[in-house]
Amino acid sequence: MNGEILPVVFIAVLTGCALARAGRASEQLIVVIEQVSDLFFKMVGFLMYLAPIGAFGAMAFTIGKPGAVHN
């Protein structure tokens, strides 16, 4: 990431300023953005819930291979 985040932050700030200046006209768009944000947070929360199960499965698979544990 060689400075690729700066344009994203710049566009986000400009969009936020434009929505703030639009006032009442932008309320519906703000509600949609908040709902999409909630959806993404729920998806990330679900993935974080499943991550330990996946890590355990990967370790169990590796340990369960023949010859994985040497005497």
Image (spheres, helix red, strand yellow):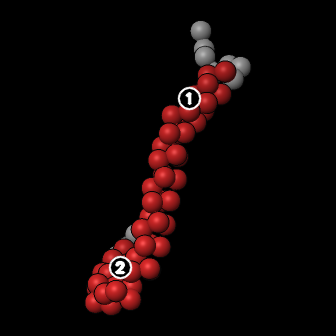
Q: Quadrant of residue 41?
A: bottom left
Expressed as whole percent of the image width and height from the top left, the position of residue 69 reads 61, 16
Instruction: Please state the total of marks drawn on the protein image.
Output: 2
Name the mark on residue 56.
1
Q: Residues within 10 Å of mark 1 (few under 14, many from 20)?
A: few
Residue at 60% x, 32% y is 58
Expressed as whole percent of the image width and height from the top left, the position of residue 13 reads 30, 81
Tell me if residue 55 comes above or below residue 14 in the rendering: above
- Of residue 42 and residue 58, the one placed in the foreground of this image is 42
Asked if residue 45 shows in the view, the reply is: yes
Amino acid marked by disc 2: Ala
Amino acid marked by disc 1: Phe
Q: Quadrant of the C terminus?
A: top right
Name the mark on residue 31.
none
Residue at 29% x, 84% y is 20
The answer to whether residue 4 is left or right of residue 40 is left
- Gap in Å between the C-alphas at discs 1 and 2? 38 Å
Q: Quadrant of the N terminus?
A: bottom left
- Of residue 46 and residue 33, the one placed in the foreground of this image is 33
Looking at the rendered structure, the secondary structure element under dot 1 is: helix
What residue occupies the far top of the structure in this picture? 71
Residue at 49% x, 66% y is 36
Q: Residues within 10 Å of mark 2 (few under 14, many from 20)?
A: few
Tell me if residue 14 comes above or below residue 64 in the rendering: below
Asked if residue 11 shows in the view, the reply is: no
Residue at 50% x, 59% y is 39
The answer to whether residue 13 is left or right of residue 34 is left
Task: For the residues labelled 1 and 2, say whether their Cβ atoms are less than 8 Å apart.
Answer: no
Which residue carries the number 2 mark? 12
The answer to whether residue 33 is left or right of residue 15 is right
Looking at the rendered structure, the secondary structure element under dot 2 is: helix
